[in-house]
Image: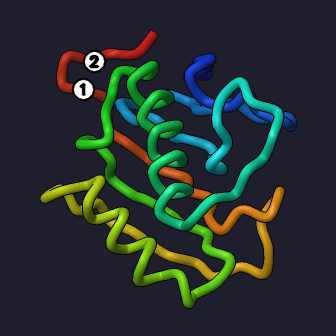
Amino acid sequence: MHSISTPSAPSPAGHYSQAIVHNGCVYVAGQLPIVPGQSEHRAGTIEEQTAQVFANISAIVQEAGSSLSRLLQVTVYISDMELWGRFNAAYAALMGAHRPARAVVPVNALHYGYHIEVQVIAALNDAGGGQ
């Protein structure tokens, strides 16, 4: 078991790793749509937040030796179920034909006023990948 860290995704703000690799899978901690390296927290639209959060997740799983096309499970925390349809459309555009198992969980509020936080589990590439 080992942890993953990349400067291409937001640094953890607490006592956790961006991701952990174990037994052929990468477990990515919940990611907010923070732009790496920026201290300003601009929420933007749900579509912009979806694109950013998956850019962050993509950077992390790539560092681990995987990709978005290898996602097995996606858990989305969303601050307003009224945004579900717009989130789902943006997510579908990003994921294309790939349909990992997914849950969308309504929550009261997320840090910095963001509308979504996403955590995933992905399979490592067949060649093994990772560090």
Q: Quadrant of residue 110?
A: bottom right
Read off the residue under disc 1.
Answer: 125
- Residue at the far right in the pictured view: 14
Q: Residue at x 39, y 57 (%)?
A: 73
Q: Position of residue 58 (x, y in %)?
A: 42, 35
Q: Nearer the viewer, residue 22 or 55?
A: 55
Question: SS at mark 2?
Answer: loop
Q: Nearer the viewer, residue 86 or 96?
A: 86
Q: Quadrant of residue 67?
A: top left
Q: Please state which amino acid type lies under the numbered disc 1.
A: Asn
Q: Position of residue 4 (x, y in %)?
A: 58, 21
Considering only vertical position in the picture, is 45 above or below 48?
Answer: below
Q: Is residue 74 visible?
A: yes
Q: Position of residue 39 (x, y in %)?
A: 82, 33
Q: Residue at x 85, y 34 (%)?
A: 15
Gap in angstroms between the C-alphas marked 2 and 1: 5 Å
Q: Quadrant of residue 114?
A: bottom right
Mark 2: few, some, or many residues within 10 Å (few <14, many ≥20)? few
Q: Please state which amino acid type lies under the numbered disc 2.
A: Gly
- Residue at the far top in the pictured view: 131
- Residue at the far bottom in the pictured view: 82
Q: Is residue 22 visible?
A: no
Read off the residue under disc 2.
Answer: 128
Q: Are marks 2 and 1 in contact (CB under 8 Å)?
A: yes
Q: Residue at x 26, y 41 (%)?
A: 70
Q: Residue at x 31, y 41 (%)?
A: 68
Q: Position of residue 14 (x, y in %)?
A: 86, 37
Question: SS at mark 1?
Answer: loop
Considering only vertical position in the picture, is 120 above or below 16?
Answer: below
Left or right of residue 113: residue 100: left
